[in-house]
Amino acid sequence: MPEKRLQELGITLPPPPKPVASYVPSVVSGNLLFVSGQIPVSGGKLVCEGIVGKDLDVEKARDAARTCILNALAVVKEQLVDLGRVKKIVKLSGYVASAPDFTQQPAVVNGASDLLVDVFGEEKGRHSRVAVGVASLPLNAPVEIDLIVEIE
Amino acid sequence: MPEKRLQELGITLPPPPKPVASYVPSVVSGNLLFVSGQIPVSGGKLVCEGIVGKDLDVEKARDAARTCILNALAVVKEQLVDLGRVKKIVKLSGYVASAPDFTQQPAVVNGASDLLVDVFGEEKGRHSRVAVGVASLPLNAPVEIDLIVEIE
Amino acid sequence: MPEKRLQELGITLPPPPKPVASYVPSVVSGNLLFVSGQIPVSGGKLVCEGIVGKDLDVEKARDAARTCILNALAVVKEQLVDLGRVKKIVKLSGYVASAPDFTQQPAVVNGASDLLVDVFGEEKGRHSRVAVGVASLPLNAPVEIDLIVEIE
């Protein structure tokens, strides 16, 4: 029960962020839910910003990845109403704004992956993943994450 | 009727660009159509090139994103014959070649998103999206865009 | 028969790489198989590393892309047991760690695409694709590749 697990973890999902453009937070096609790229916004502001390995370190960026996934879960809940309708987290793409010599993208994106497993359990929460280091991200975010989720 | 809407907008789709490698412009799997990454080529040449925020500005890059999506629609039409068979634009991924301090990727990719909504309408045209700033792109293109489309 | 074709090509697939984090090598959803991002690891070590166009050239990077796809095929085989269950390679995403002036990502990613066509044939092996130049990659890998595969 992911909703109950969030409670146990003391996590209240934020209001789902509104896209500021001609796109929507998520789209359902068949039994796949595509969640738009989420940046680490909380209360309308980035929790941290800049290029990882230059402006901020792995720990800060990992926390930012966790904030991204909370926003993603808020979007999933807005679409499905009940997170219990999630059958499987299928794919997570993690984009880390990286200095050319920063190569610890997996450690950063683990902040997102670990929370998914914690909330949905091993069976449903473990996902395929790609993690890459990009040049820069919207609003100077250090991390952006999108998801593909299988639903009942 | 997306075909009629294109006419109203005075838009003639270009011939679909041919990949210059061991891949194809699009693949259908079930009722999903995956369109390969499109760069802003028109008449066999890039409409502009370079790194956004260094070699060109947001306006130019937004126009380039629009050209990318025209190429993508040409590929969709080649595959489906009739754009009316598009049920939903599911996901747009926008890659913007970016200087490390360029953070307006959403404004650039809106050039693509806005046209999709204009052609397919709110219901079918609005899509999930990710926009990131990459280090560089094929042929020195400033933008590359790929699509997942749900078909009838 | 992809297994036989691998033999003819003198290729033995490596043991599938183990992710070092809270994710899994691949996930099946419906008849799509999502393979996690693969880097050019062989025998537990990167076959080459660095930024393409600065630390290594196109040829080396193309070989690295080939190693990525061997790892991806090892993951597919681990999941499906028999590569003959592959119905279609649907989508390949190629991320090339790139100097800002390196624009030959397609030539690099062809190392992966060409092998897929060689192993699965034109009909099943040709795929949609996106190739972009990123700032850096996990462990300082020059290339990372993920796949979506349609299965029987």
Image (cartoon, coloured by chain):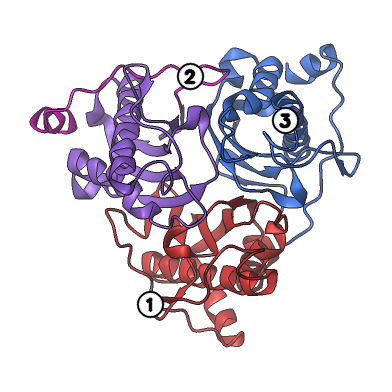
Chain colours: A red, B purple, C blue
Q: Amino acid at mark 2?
A: Pro
User: Circle 1 marks a residue in which chain?
Assistant: A
Return the residue found at the far right: C43
Position of residue C41 measured from the top left corner of the image (x, y, whole percent):
82, 40
For the point 59% across and 30% down, the residue is C105
CA gap between label 2 and label 1 equals 42 Å
Q: Amino acid at mark 1?
A: Gly
Q: Which residue is mark 3?
A: C61
In this image, B109 relative to C125: left or right? Answer: left
Position of residue B97 measured from the top left corner of the image (x, y, whole percent):
47, 43
| Foreground of the two, A55 or C78 | A55
Q: What residue span does the magenta drawing correspond to?
A: B1-27
* Camera-nearest label, 2 or 3: 3
Q: Could you classify mark 2 by the number of other residues whose Cα lies within 10 Å: few (under 14), some (14-19), or many (20 or more)?
A: some
CA gap between label 1 and label 3 equals 41 Å
**Are the residues flagged by discs 2 and 3 from a single subunit?**
no
Q: Secondary structure at mark 1?
A: loop
| Foreground of the two, A98 or B91 | A98
**Are the residues flagged by discs 1 and 3 from a single subunit?**
no
Position of residue C23 measured from the top left corner of the image (x, y, whole percent):
70, 57
